[in-house]
């Protein structure tokens, strides 16, 4: 399949390469990406020695074929491939640091998107992500121009296979005080995706009673959509929580780097509420530490950090931005509205089990229900993220800044304006002709009114 500029702009996103298989992402693209990535890595490392690229993949139908061709491209480029096989994204990041395979990495996944999509997350000196500002644009040029093919060496790389599951489980369990746990009942939904490989091993030696649904890997993903952040996709989990009279339910997305929670009533708990709860628990033993959050999260997150003697740091949305900021400023913990949670001791990468363990320990120690633990953090009414198609993004942001200039203005990521009783954040998408709007207020009536007002103000800048 021939690549043209329009086609390439569709698959090269701000933080990764992603598209529909096989129309946009296919074996030919995978090979070219592998070859270009090998050349990029050699330039970065100045070709001092034989280099290794770590590769993991999810269990989508297209992942095995894309792995074979991407790996071939990398090896034809003179770089070794260390294959982890099917794994989660957190396992991939762990392996890079624990085993010192930190030259570069490539994770084959489309995360929470449906099975018909696939893609590549690239890293240099894993786990530092490569985005459009740190190398992805250069790799795009090589893929389009075929530079990698022209520079192909005669000394090819080799394939090395690595099994990391046992060591990963040991690493994750270091964060768990198992003696503090009581026999809680937990329903876990892994959506037929790779986290299903990990769950039995992690909870085998704990007192937690788990009910694991959709546990077997199945590339058809027949039971639910891979996006676990939408309550409508968790009907099976809710049903099982109520049936089992469980203490809570949790679900993971397609590559295992997002975790969401249902309380004992089967009610979906906002990621901002989970972030605020986690921050308060972490800061008990770590007062004065920095915790990073994003402008689209509830005000309760910042309040919880400050009330528990932590230092609140607002950062830009996106795993690439969060990881770079955490590493640069030595930040202990990070949380995004997208249900990603990051931890310094996990190499500043996604750490869903750490958050789960913290909540299980608190439930065990307090004998409270999850709904009781989260109730103090449910002070505000949050709209959720609203995507609005728009042509003139800059014009819309300027108009809103001028209209609400009396508020407290932040431009860390798009535009956030705070007033005593409400606030909003509007961020331009880097890959689509849309803006993402979030509104929060102290009452539902105020939130709904301000949401309608903002949408009306943005309308003249739409298509």
Image: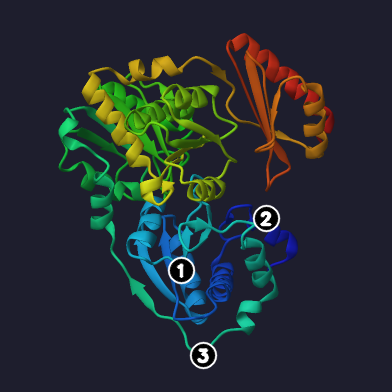
Residue at the spot 54% in from the left edge and 35% down from the top edge: 313
Residue ID for mark 2: 10
Tell me if 83 is positioned left or right of 453 in this view.
Answer: left
Q: Nearer the viewer, residue 99 or 118?
A: 99
Q: Is residue 124 visible?
A: yes
SS class of the residue under badge 3? loop
Q: Depth-wise, is mark 3 or mark 2 nearer the camera?
A: 3
- Tell me how far mark 1 sits from mark 2, CA to CA: 28 Å
Tell me if 196 is positioned left or right of 34 in this view.
Answer: left
Q: Depth-wise, is mark 3 or mark 1 nearer the camera?
A: 1
SS class of the residue under badge 2? helix
Tell me if 382 is positioned left or right of 436 in this view.
Answer: left
Residue ID for mark 1: 103
Classify the position of the C terminus by image quarter.
top right
**Going from the N terminus, do you reach mark 3 or mark 1 first?**
1
Q: Nearer the viewer, residue 327 or 24?
A: 327
Q: Depth-wise, is mark 1 or mark 2 nearer the camera?
A: 1
Q: Is residue 142 above or below residue 273?
A: below
SS class of the residue under badge 1? loop
Q: Is residue 31 above or below residue 16?
A: below
Residue at the spot 63% in from the left edge and 17% down from the top edge: 422
Indicate the colouring scheme: rainbow
The circle on residue 81 is none
Classify the position of the N terminus by image quarter.
bottom right
Q: Is residue 339 visible?
A: no
- Tell me how far mark 3 sits from mark 2, CA to CA: 33 Å
Residue 196: % across, % down:
31, 47
Residue 163: % across, % down:
28, 64
**Going from the N terminus, do you reach mark 1 or mark 2 first?**
2
Crowd rating for badge 2 (residues with CA inside 10 Å; few <14, some 14–19, many 20+): some
């Amino acid at each position: 399949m021939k690549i043209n500029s329009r086609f390439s702009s569709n698959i090269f996103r701000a933080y990764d390469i992603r598209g529909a298989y096989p129309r946009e992402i296919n074996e030919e693209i995978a090979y070219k990406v592998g070859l270009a990535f090998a050349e990029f890595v050699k330039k970065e490392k100045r070709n001092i020695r034989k280099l290794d690229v770590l590769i993991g993949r999810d269990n989508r139908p297209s992942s095995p074929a894309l792995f074979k061709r991407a790996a071939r491209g990398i090896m034809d480029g003179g770089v070794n491939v260390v294959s982890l096989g099917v794994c989660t994204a957190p396992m991939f990041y762990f392996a890079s640091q624990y085993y010192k395979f930190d030259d570069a990495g490539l994770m084959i996944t489309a995360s929470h998107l449906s099975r018909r999509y696939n893609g590549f997350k690239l890293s240099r000196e894993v786990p530092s992500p490569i985005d459009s500002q740190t190398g992805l644009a250069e790799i795009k040029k090589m893929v389009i121009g075929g530079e990698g093919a022209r520079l192909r060496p005669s000394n090819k790389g080799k394939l090395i296979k690595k099994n990391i599951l046992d060591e990963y489980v040991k690493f994750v369990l270091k964060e768990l005080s198992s003696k503090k746990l009581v026999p809680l009942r937990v329903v876990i939904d892994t959506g037929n995706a790779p986290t299903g490989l990990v769950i039995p091993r992690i909870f085998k030696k704990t007192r937690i009673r788990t009910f694991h649904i959709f546990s077997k890997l199945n590339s058809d993903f027949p039971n639910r959509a891979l996006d676990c952040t939408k309550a409508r996709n968790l009907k099976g989990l809710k049903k099982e929580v109520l049936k089992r009279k469980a203490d809570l339910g949790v679900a993971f997305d397609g590559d295992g780097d997002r975790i969401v929670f249902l309380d004992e009533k089967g009610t979906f708990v906002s990621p901002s509420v989970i972030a605020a709860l986690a921050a308060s628990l972490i800061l008990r033993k770590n007062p004065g530490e920095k915790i990073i959050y994003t402008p689209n999260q509830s005000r309760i997150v910042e309040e919880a950090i400050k009330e528990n003697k932590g230092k609140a740091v607002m950062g830009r949305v996106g795993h690439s931005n969060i990881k770079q900021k955490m590493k640069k400023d030595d930040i202990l913990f990070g949380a995004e509205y997208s249900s990603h949670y990051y931890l310094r001791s996990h190499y500043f990468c996604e750490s869903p089990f750490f958050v789960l363990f913290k909540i299980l320990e608190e439930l065990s120690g307090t004998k409270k229900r999850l709904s009781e633990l989260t109730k103090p953090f449910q002070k505000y009414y949050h709209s959720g993220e609203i995507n609005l198609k728009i042509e003139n993004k800059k014009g819309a942001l300027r108009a809103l800044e001028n209209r609400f200039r009396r508020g407290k203005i932040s431009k860390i990521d798009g535009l956030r304006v705070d007033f005593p009783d409400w606030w909003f954040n509007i961020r331009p998408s880097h890959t689509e002709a849309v803006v993402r709007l979030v509104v929060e207020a102290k009452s539902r009536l105020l939130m709904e009114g301000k949401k309608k007002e903002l949408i009306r103000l943005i309308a003249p800048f739409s298509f």
